[in-house]
Amino acid sequence: MSGECRPCTAICFSVPSRGADKRLSATKHIPQFEPEKKEPPLCASCGQEIFGPCMTALAPNSSCAQKYHPFHFICTYCTKPLNLRGTYKEYQKKPYCHECFYRLYSGHIYEIS
């Protein structure tokens, strides 16, 4: 052994170890804890892991926030892409464009051009 700590994911502290003749022979590293391995978020639309850019929506500041691949953030009814910088409507934790939301849930009939 070269006396150097191998790179690992554990956070370590050094403890001198004693050989058979009670002299300090080397320093061994004892892991204090394993850091939490963070899993990639799952897309709320397709259920696959998100490794690239992701869209956080539907209560983005709470623990109930849902994450989406940017190309999966679409209106639940008409499947048009929702504007990533704009606004959308939400009903039962599903995103809708304004037109579909008002057509479906306002009780009024709207014509969509």
Image (cartoon, grey):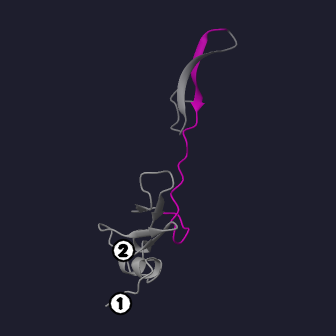
Q: Secondary structure at mark 2?
A: loop
Residues shaded magenta: 22-50
**47 horizontally vs 81: left or right:** right
Relative vertical location of residue 97 with respect to residue 109 in this rendering, above or below? above
Main secondary structure of the magenta stretch: loop
Q: Which mark is residue 38?
A: none
Residue 103 counted in the magenta span: no
Residue topped by disc 1: 111
The residue carrying pointer 1 sits among few (fewer than 14), some (14 to 19) or many (20 or more) residues within 10 Å by Cα, namely: few
Query: What's the amino acid at mark 1?
Result: Glu
Which image quarter: residue 16? top right
Relative vertical location of residue 10 with respect to residue 64 in this rendering, above or below? above
Camera-side residue of 31 and 92: 92
Q: CA distance from mark 2 to mark 1?
A: 19 Å
Asked if the residue under mark 1 is in contact with the one under mark 2, i.e. CB atoms within 8 Å, the reply is: no
The residue carrying pointer 2 sits among few (fewer than 14), some (14 to 19) or many (20 or more) residues within 10 Å by Cα, namely: many
Percent x, y of residue 87:
33, 68
Relative vertical location of residue 88 with respect to residue 79 in this rendering, above or below? above
Camera-side residue of 65 and 32: 65
- Work out which quarter of the rendered image holds the C terminus and state it: bottom left
Mark 2 or mark 1, earlier in chain: 2
Percent x, y of residue 38:
53, 49
Camera-side residue of 7 and 4: 7
Q: Residue at x 56, y 68 (%)?
A: 47
Query: What's the amino acid at mark 2?
Result: Leu
Percent x, y of residue 39:
54, 53
Which image quarter: residue 54? bottom left
- Which is closer to the viewer, label 2 or label 1? 1
Percent x, y of residue 66:
48, 61
Residue topped by disc 2: 82
Which residue lies most toward the front here?
107
Residue 45 counted in the magenta span: yes
